[in-house]
Amino acid sequence: MGIEVDHLVGGYSQVPVLKDVNFQVNDGEVVGLIGLNGAGKSTTINHIIGLLTPQKGRVVVGGTTLSEDPTRYKQQIAYIPELPVLYDELTLAETLSLTMMAYGLEQEATWQRAHRLLKMFRLDNKLDWFPANFSKGMKQKVMIVNAFMTDAKVYIIDEPFLGLDPVAVHDLLTLIEDAKKNGAAILMSTHVLANAEKYCDRFILLHQGQIKVAGTLAQLQAAFPQAGNSLDDIYLSLADGERNE
Ligand SMILES: Nc1ncnc2c1ncn2[C@@H]1O[C@H](COP(=O)(O)OP(=O)(O)OP(=O)(O)O)[C@@H](O)[C@H]1O
């Protein structure tokens, strides 16, 4: 059932940032949300995770809207924010426990998954550490463990590669691939186009709050035949066009 963003108009005030944004992310699919700074990627994500209310249109996740069933809606979504958000006064173990409670997860099985992820990101001996003891990249890894241990149906991942070492980037991409194979719907916003090109099935290119173009890499290549073949080339050609508008 995935994510359905249905003719969404929205933003932070009466003047909308998003103007009729319309797309789906199907189960078992990774979709890349791409766009220049200020294009509206985080605003789209804030609508999907329920921080913002649509002015028009709606967002459906796993067949339900936020207003129909707020608890079910939120429990289906694992979210990795652009910047780590952690409670200063909670240890790593307490942070993970809190998520398990909030998501109503079975503790034993979830702790098993958490331990595998903690080991992967070399955090397994830091369960009694507080956020103040973690480096920037380690905090980001905590957010990744916290999200992927939930075994969610839907993943919203906002610019996840900043501050991660190359091993962690590789491990995160493996987790994304595994979640996709398990049927999750994944929306990932990123400026790291090489990773997007390799791991996303489809792309949505946002510009000034509207979808400029959407499709597979082959569809994007066909839409911009004058650009080179890579996502990077297509994106640069699009950005150039916008500069000259
Ligand atoms: N909290 C806010 N209040 C008011 N306007 C905002 C707020 N956050 C973002 N905006 C505006 O919304 C527009 C889209 O911003 P958004 O953060 O969605 O862009 P983005 O595509 O995620 O950019 P970036 O790549 O820089 O993260 C911008 O014009 C920005 O100024």
Image (cartoon, rainbow, N blue to C red):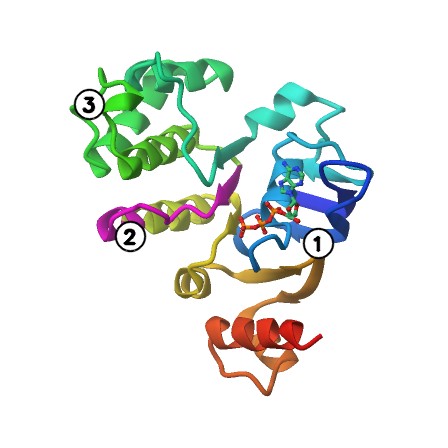
Q: Looking at the rendered structure, which numbered label has been put on residue 113?
A: none
Residue denoted by label 3: 126
Question: Which quadrant of the structure image shows residue 50?
Answer: top right
Is 47 situated left or right of 84 in this image?
right
Mark 1 and 2 residues: CB-CB less than 8 Å, in contact? no
Crowding near pointer 1: few (<14 within 10 Å), some, many (20+)?
Answer: many
Disc 3 or disc 1, which is closer to the eye? 1
Crowding near pointer 2: few (<14 within 10 Å), some, many (20+)?
Answer: some
Q: Position of residue 193 (x, y in %)?
A: 44, 64
Query: Image point 49% across, 77% down: which residue?
Result: 233
| Three-letter code, disc 3 | Lys
Q: Looking at the rendered structure, which numbered label has been put on residue 170?
A: 2
| Three-letter code, disc 1 | Gly
Query: Image point 28% across, 22% down: which residue?
Result: 132
Query: Image point 28% across, 52% down: which residue?
Result: 170
Residue placed furthest toward the left: 125
Is 158 colored magenta in this rendering?
yes
Residue denoted by label 1: 209
Residue placed furthest toward the bottom: 226
Q: Quadrant of the N terminus?
A: top right
Mark 2 and 3 residues: CB-CB less than 8 Å, in contact? no
- Looking at the rendered structure, the number of numbered marks drawn on it comes to 3
Q: Earlier in the sequence, mark 3 or mark 1?
A: 3
Q: Position of residue 20 (x, y in %)?
A: 79, 52
When the figure is inspected, residue 20 is found, relative to residue 13, above or below; the finding is below
Q: Position of residue 12 (x, y in %)?
A: 71, 36
Q: Which residues are magenta?
A: 154-170
